[in-house]
Image (tube, rainbow, N blue to C red):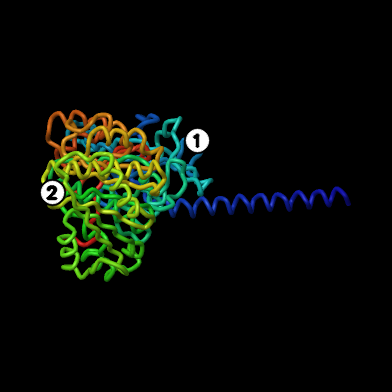
Amino acid sequence: MAVVDFGVGLCDRLKCFLLVIGWSLLVVLMSQNEIRLKEHVGIVTSDTGTRQFNFFVTSLKNRAWVGIEDYVMVDHPVFGESCPLLGVVKELRNYEEVVGTTVNEKTVETVATSEILGYVDMRKPEMRRLRKLSVPPSPGSKVYLPSYEFLEDVLLRDLKGKPFTHPLCLGTLESQAVAKNGDAKSLSFCLDAEDLAHQHMLIAGVSGSGKTHTAMVIVEELANKTHYPVVILDPHSEYLTLGLAGKHLQELKANDPAATKNYPFNFRVSLYAYDADKAINTLRKFGVEPGKGSRFIVQGVPGDWSKACNGRVEAEMEEVLKEGVKAGQVTIIDANGLAAGERDNFFTCCVKALWQARINGSTEPFLLVVEDSATVETETLETIASEGRKTGVSMCLLSQHLTKASRAVLSQTSAQFIGRSTDTPDLEYLKHMAGDKHVLVPQLARGEWIANGITMMKPTAVRMRERYSLIV
């Protein structure tokens, strides 16, 4: 009886084991169908490494070809399909091959070179970070196109593999992917608010490259999706309507309400203006009456700014400005109406006052946006650049000529958006920031950027989205 019982128990265990294996295979099969297209797009050649691999390209029934910057996927050489390896196509080349007994019998083969980004361990779906590859892909492995949904999931995670807490969607990548419904869609370019608000940023490019537009998109994302305070130095009243939803957002809401639910535009705007009457009249043109009960507060800051501010003026400005830097609020310091030299003194005094208020704990941590023409004393900017992140002041610096900016400030920017530049000294400096993408910098159009930073896998070409706020 004991032997029989033992035998029956063993059979039951075997059945359970096979059932578990069956379910595991089913789960893997289902996950593979979700993360990649069914039809393969190539075969890995014998020329492989841990940084890149080559593959023979095959045509697809529902897609013409694999293109530059497309994401591709192969099985891990050790862990198999449970750990797909991601790469980006960097080069395509053709060569002729003799297939018969005469030189006239030829065929053209296309070989793609893919840069390896890393592999994703699907056995730990909650931590889908890209891990470093230590073994080259296996020659003969099939190459697939990853699905749009899978790529979006991987790209919307930090370097540890955790999903972004507050994804700030700034635009799109130059790559596309095929969604489950068969449509080709551009991949989103998003950064985590936690990362973006706690590091210094640089937005560099020639006049007309879209620096101010990019800064506005970043502020829109922070203000609508977080309560993180933002302070903007506005030389020419370009940011006054930042708190009002514009025509483009209204059109998007009409076509796809769900896509715009994260942009309520209900944050407060505190405006400190040298010419308060002019600022108020501008807002009234768009149906806004600033004051008590309104999201918009306008306060005048007149004075003699022909001289550099002293300790007394700085202390007075600290008392004025510290009330404006609050959670869920954008603070705009508008210098419209001041001459260039007066504007420099005005902004320098404001930044010194804000810095001192933060040192004293009178304000919450905030992001400071410094426009290219909003000149601030170099020593003050260098202090913020070197000590700001520890103190709770991060900076977004807009610059047209990097060679004219302080190297001490630039060296502290850990996130960069590099736009079009044709200046030879600037291009030489940008090589270190744009990496292998630096050759594209002179060709970039308005709104196109090379994004780079410590939270990004590599320098990436992106297109900034349309502005959702009202344009003056």
Q: Is residue 282 left or right of residue 37?
A: left
The picture places residue 197, in percent across and down from the top left corner, at 36, 46
Badge 2 or badge 1: first in the primary sequence: 1
Quick check: marks 2 and 1 in contact, CB under 8 Å?
A: no
Q: Which mark is residue 338?
A: 2
Badge 1 amino acid: Val
Label 2 SS:
loop
Q: Quadrant of the C terminus?
A: bottom left
Percent coordinates x, y for residue 68 in the rendering: 25, 42
The residue sitting at the right extreme is 1
Tag 2: amino acid: Leu
Badge 2 local density, few (<14 within 10 Å), some, or many (20+)? some
Q: CA distance from mark 2 to mark 1?
A: 66 Å
Q: Nearer the viewer, residue 42 or 358?
A: 358
Q: Is there any visible trace of residue 403 in the rendered image? A: yes
Q: From this viewpoint, is residue 114 visible?
A: no
Which label was assigned to residue 78? Answer: 1
- Judge whether 176 appears above or below 111 on screen: below
Disc 1 packing (10 Å; few <14; some 14–19; many ≥20) = few
Task: Name the residue rendered at 46%, 51% in the picture.
Answer: 32
